[in-house]
Image (cartoon, rainbow, N blue to C red):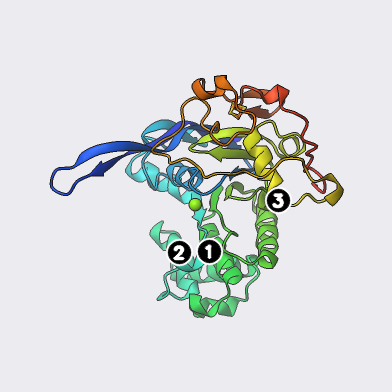
Amino acid sequence: MSTLLEVEGLARHYPVKKGVLVQRQIGTVRAVDGVSFSVKRGETLALVGESGCGKSTTARLVLRLIEPSAGTIRFDGQDVTHAGGAAMRALRRRMQIVFQDPYASLNPRLTVGDAIAEPMQVHGIGDADARRAKVQELLRLVGLAAFHAERYPHEFSGGQRQRIGIARALSVEPDLVVCDEPVSALDVSIQAQVVNLMKDLQARLGLSYLFIAHDLSVVKHMADRVAVMYLGQIMEIGDKRSLFRDPRHPYTRALLAAIPHPDPARRGKVTPLGGDVPSPMNIPPGCRFHTRCPFAQDRCRSEAPELRAVGSNHAAACHFSESLPDAGLDYSGGLT
Ligand code: SF4
Ligand code: MG
């Protein structure tokens, strides 16, 4: 599989200012703080972490909906970071986003048909008749009846609205779809339907997904690879099977411990995480996870661990990855 998206050293820092007439900078928020990953063609990379870890910011940086402070983004060999005008427009068509809240992202005054057709219009694709035909095709593709095109977003359920959001993203035939927690706002029973639809669409259309979630259970059946983020950096990244079977970072272990093990007899011996995520304005020195890590040692408080290989297609940023106690964790059960 060839690489479609390549992100290196991506960062988004912004100053925090105080004062009304005279403003002075009181700190810097490091929302994304040096993140590198790639997404191959036809692959799903999941980006997982608690809220505030920088995953949504990373999604927006990749699409350049916000500008990075540092780092490079390459898409299909082209430099996204410095692309301007026409080049950026062409790239934007090939990278679409599905938002968490389908209701907030759909204009209530547009019919569903017009909302789905809007990106095609923006990118000058087809005439009105061609767009109308494409809307019908897209509605069927996401499992909705064609007559729904004449209706308004409020007439649909949350799951249906997310199907509409997906149809809208697919209208311009992108290669990459960035999915920012697309099922987090949905009932659990509906989540699986939408995830299955997305997997099905991926197989049919050869899509690549950067799939963001705060919960590892959601990405278990969706992802090919998983990256776990904490305070703006990747703590662990790897092939899904390897990461679920043998997590090598204490943070990943804590996230796994928070989801029910498929086999109750084999629930892990890891206690769920205590404490809050520190502020991204005040990132702890050394290993940024040390204030919550049950295995922290002196070295962790002063020396930041590098992300390094702990297996084939598996890397972790922990000084003690190799010597973590066997937690009795194996969450790879049921993986297909
Ligand atoms: Fe915990 Fe130290 Fe590893 Fe950081 S480097 S995750 S504090 S053991
Ligand atoms: Mg978010």
Q: Is mark 3 within 8 Å of ligand 2?
A: no
Which residue is nearer to you in this view: 279 or 146? 279
Choose the circle earlier in sequence order: 1 or 2.
2
Q: Alpha-carbon distance for marks 3 and 1?
A: 28 Å
Residue at 65% of width from left, 38% of height from top? 252
Label 2: which residue? 105
Label 3: which residue? 259
Circle 3 packing at 10 Å, graded few (<14), some (14-19), many (20+), is: some
- Amino acid type for the residue under numbered disc 3: Ile
Label 1: which residue? 165
Residue at 69% of width from left, 29% of height from top? 313
Asked which secondary structure carries label 1, the reply is helix
- Amino acid type for the residue under numbered disc 2: Ser
Residue at 51% of width from left, 80% of height from top? 151
Going by the image, does 255 lie left or right of 87? Answer: right
Residue at 50% of width from left, 71% of height from top? 132
Q: Alpha-carbon distance for marks 3 and 2?
A: 29 Å
Choose the circle earlier in sequence order: 3 or 2.
2
Which residue is nearer to you in this view: 292 or 49? 292
Q: Alpha-carbon distance for marks 1 and 2?
A: 8 Å
User: Which quadrant of the figure shows ligand 1?
Assistant: top right
Q: Are marks 1 and 2 in contact (CB under 8 Å)?
A: yes
